[in-house]
Image (cartoon, coloured by chain):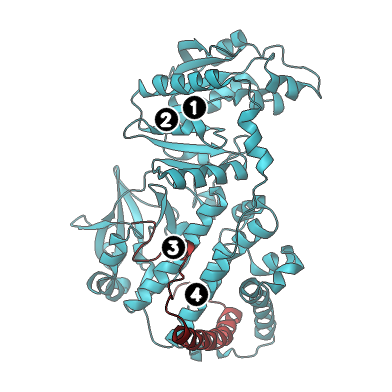
Chain colours: A red, B cyan
Amino acid sequence: MYIDPGTGSVLLQIILAAALSLGVVIRIFWKKIKALFSKNSNTTSAEDELLDPDKGENQ
Amino acid sequence: MSNKVASSFRDPSGFMFTRGEKLFRQVNQVYKEDYDLLMSSGLYDKLVKLKWMVVHQETNESPLVPEIAYKVIEPNKVPFISYPYEWSFSQLRIAALLTLAIEKQSLNFGMSLKDASAYNIQFVNNSPVLIDTLSLTKYREGEPWVAYRQFCQHFLGPLALMSKVDLQLQKLLINFIDGIPLELCSKLLPGSTRINSGLMMHIHMHASAQQRANKEQSLGKNSPVKSANISKTGRLALIESLESTIKGLNCKINGELWADYYANTNYSTDAFEEKKKLVFETVSALDPHMIYDLGANTGIFSLEAAKIPGSLVISSDIDPEAVEINYQELKKQKIENVLPLVIDLTNPTPSIGWDNAERGSFLTREKADVVMALALIHHLAIANNLPLSSIAASFSKLGKYLLLEFVPKEDSQVVRLLSSREDIFPNYTLEGVKQEFSGYYKLIKEIPISGSKRTLLLFETSGK
């Protein structure tokens, strides 16, 4: 580690990481529930594919 | 003759050096474990295959500082170096998204970016590429992302300011070499950005967290940072949150400014097509590689020059909106050999950083074979009072040939410039230009553009 991560930045990260990963869990759970009721789940937009490692614009 | 590259001193993992014409990177012993992991984990191959990272070869070249050296590698040269304060909004945005995409990909391979500097990204074939091979380090379970703050200062802050306040605020990056301080971003952003959850978290709360921590540190309180523990899911969630915040930022373009530009010229459609043809024919006859199109506006004539096989056109303009349109148009047309940049010729990007040597000025980059200055001279000579001989002197330093379009006083563009001021430019005539430029150039060709009052002049530097 050669740059200073910054105390404040690290403290904030601890809080955000916890809160945001809770969000991720809820999102996955919600997707699963939605998937139960719908067949068509392909909703990725062109924007999402911008730097998708499989379809990225840089390929 | 070997020389350490002036900007390559922050990271002890290694540094760049030049030897003759060639550019090398010394990898130091301290980075050995990370370098071997980068190469053996499959991450390097993956990133290179995606064209996200610069390709390098390992060489037998002798290191510059052998006592600490592990390897010497030779990265593919970037054809033209440019800096974040010269990019359009979308260029900075795609560079930010690439940085995050690389970080996500790296975590899959057990590695992580230890820095997230915008200077580690360059544009090659008009797409962003990570040029710092030594940026990747082994990921250790539980550790926070050390580059989080740097990412926000280099990318998110400037993008938010450009999107929510004014595109021109990107020039703040010239004053702050390690990115715009978050406290400053937070102060400058309108209060309404606090309801944007991403900006609230990563800028506003980030700035207050820093402030609070600084205060506590100055009171001598111990920080719990060293024992911080963040799960990998948490790390990924943070990256994804940054990603969606950046994707949610866009740049407003005032349609008038550019849509009107070509509509208001002194050209009939025929004369405009004629000018395009003349520009292409004249420039391609010189068989150039590097071409500068100065004052390129949205890049219409850069596209003509880009038709020349093997050419690279640096398409610069003072107007960040015009450069944004230029970039978007190139992406739409999938043209790769034009690099649009925001450059104010009356105050070109200076050299900045330590010893004023880290990031070179615009005038000291790769020299051009041909400099195009189409419908530009009246802006410099009349709107900015620049003496013609001084314009010639400056252009002659940029490249060998100069294709100059002279716009006479009868032209409506010049009439407009002179409408609100006294005409103190008796010398501003075709003959005057030829006379003043003869101090630095010899005139090779003079081509009147039929259907207009303008003239194309092709000069070659006289080497005086």
Q: CA distance from mark 4 to mark 1?
A: 43 Å
Q: CA distance from mark 2 to mark 1?
A: 9 Å
Do the residues under discs 4 and 1 have CB atoms within 8 angstroms? Answer: no
Q: Which mark is residue B26?
A: none
Q: Which mark is residue B372?
A: 1
Do the residues under discs 4 and 2 have CB atoms within 8 angstroms? Answer: no
Q: Residue B405: x percent and y percent?
A: 55, 20
Report which residue position mark 4 lands on.
B240
The one of A49 and B107 positioned closer to us in this rendering: A49
Q: Mark 4, mark 3: which one is toward the viewer?
A: 4
Report which residue position mark 2 lands on.
B305
Residue plotted at (42% across, 68% down):
B101
Name which residue type carries label 4: Glu
Residue B92 vertical placement versus B108 (above, below): above
Residue plotted at (51% across, 47% down):
B328
Q: Could you tell which of marks 3 and 1 lies nearer the N-terminus?
A: 3
Q: Mark 2, mark 1: which one is toward the viewer?
A: 2
Q: Chain of mark 1?
A: B
Residue B233 vertical placement versus B2 (above, below): below
Q: Could you tell which of marks 4 and 3 lies nearer the N-terminus?
A: 3
Name which residue type carries label 3: Leu
Q: Residue A36: x percent and y percent?
A: 45, 87
Q: CA distance from mark 4 to mark 2?
A: 40 Å
